[in-house]
Image (tube, rainbow, N blue to C red):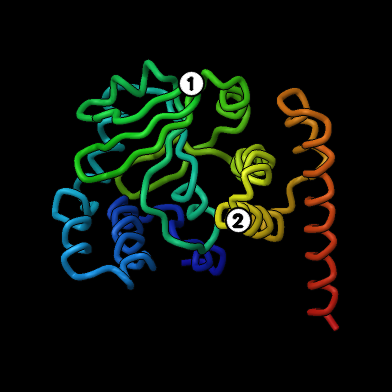
C-alpha cells in the first residue's frame, strides 16, 4: 500500500466489506450508547439494525445490476479521500424515480429534495436530483472509486466540498453546531490535502445560493486556506 493510500480509510481496491465495518463501528462507538442502559442498547442495535458486510455489498451490486445512475456521497465518500470519522449510513445522490427502483429498498421518509430508508440492515440517505444543485453536482463532479468487487460511481473531491458548503448556510441559521463542526472540519481536511481552486467552487455555487451566503462561504474558505498556509509554514521552519 502506498503512503497516500495508507492515509485513506477506504483506499482504491479495498473490499466493500470495509464499508460495512465502518458503518458497524459507528453504531458501536456512538457516544449516546455510553449513557444508555444495556436494554436500550440491545433494542437499538438488534441484528436487523446493525449493518452486515453482506448487506452493504449487496446494495452496491443491486444498484449495478439494476443499471441505476447514482453517486456515492456523504461520509463513505469522504472516507475514500481521507482518514476520518465513522458514519452510520450510506449516502447516495440520485433521481427519486431511480431510488424507488433499487431492488429491496424500503423508503421510510421523503420530501422534495431528500429521502431516507433502509436496504436490509443498511441505512440509506438519499439526495434527490429534483434539487437543481444536486443535479449539477451529479452532472459535473462524478468519478469512480475502485473497490475489490466492483467500481462505484462516486463524487469527486470538489463535488464533496461543494455539497458540504451548500449545506453550511442552512446549518448556520439553525445553529446546528454539531453538524456545522463536522462539515467545516471535513471541508478543511479536503482543502488541506487536495487544494482545489476555491474561487472555482464559489463560482459553481453562485447560481444556487443568495449573495450573502456566498460571501459568508468565501470568508470561511479564505480563513481556512490562510490557516492551512500558516500551519504549513510553521511546519517547514
In the rendered image of this protein, does residue 97 appear above or below residue 20?
above
The residue carrying pointer 1 sits among few (fewer than 14), some (14 to 19) or many (20 or more) residues within 10 Å by Cα, namely few
Count numbered badges in the picture: 2
Q: Residue at x 40, y 37 (%)?
A: 125
Q: Secondary structure at mark 2?
A: helix
In the rendered image of this protein, does residue 219 appear above or below residue 234?
above
In the rendered image of this protein, does residue 207 appear above or below residue 212?
above
What residue is pinned by disc 2? 177
Using the numbered discs, state the Cα–Cα distance from disc 2 to disc 1 in whole angstroms: 25 Å
The residue carrying pointer 2 sits among few (fewer than 14), some (14 to 19) or many (20 or more) residues within 10 Å by Cα, namely few
Task: Between residue 81 and residue 3, name the one nearer to us.
Answer: 81
Quadrant where the C terminus lies? bottom right
Answer with the quarter of the image where residue 4 lies: bottom right
Would residue 185 appear left or right of 109 to someone viewing this image? right
Q: Residue at x 84, y 70 (%)?
A: 230
- Where residue 164 sits in the image (x, y, percent)? 62, 44
Amino acid at each position: 500500500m502506498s503512503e497516500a493510500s495508507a492515509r485513506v480509510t477506504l483506499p482504491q481496491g479495498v473490499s466493500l466489506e470495509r464499508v460495512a465495518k465502518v458503518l458497524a463501528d459507528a453504531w458501536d462507538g456512538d457516544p449516546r450508547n455510553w449513557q444508555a442502559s444495556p436494554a436500550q442498547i440491545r433494542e437499538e442495535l438488534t441484528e436487523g439494525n446493525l449493518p452486515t458486510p453482506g448487506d452493504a455489498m449487496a446494495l452496491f451490486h443491486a444498484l449495478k445490476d439494476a443499471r441505476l445512475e447514482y453517486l456515492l456521497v456523504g461520509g463513505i465518500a469522504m472516507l475514500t479521500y481521507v482518514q476520518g470519522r465513522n458514519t452510520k449510513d450510506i449516502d447516495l445522490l440520485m433521481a427519486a424515480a431511480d431510488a424507488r427502483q433499487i431492488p429491496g429498498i424500503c423508503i421510510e421518509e421523503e420530501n422534495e429534495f431528500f429521502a431516507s430508508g433502509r436496504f436490509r440492515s443498511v441505512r440509506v440517505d438519499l439526495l434527490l436530483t429534483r434539487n437543481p444543485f444536486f443535479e449539477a453536482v451529479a452532472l459535473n463532479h462524478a468519478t469512480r472509486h475502485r473497490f475489490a468487487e466492483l467500481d462505484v460511481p462516486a463524487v469527486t473531491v470538489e463535488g464533496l466540498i461543494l455539497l458540504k458548503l451548500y449545506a453550511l448556510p442552512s446549518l448556520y441559521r439553525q445553529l446546528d453546531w454539531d453538524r456545522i463542526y463536522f462539515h467545516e472540519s471535513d471541508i478543511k481536511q479536503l482543502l488541506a490535502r487536495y487544494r482545489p481552486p476555491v474561487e472555482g467552487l464559489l463560482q459553481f455555487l453562485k447560481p444556487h445560493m443568495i449573495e450573502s451566503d456566498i460571501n459568508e462561504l468565501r470568508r470561511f474558505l479564505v480563513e481556512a486556506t490562510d490557516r492551512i498556509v500558516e500551519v504549513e509554514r510553521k511546519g517547514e521552519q
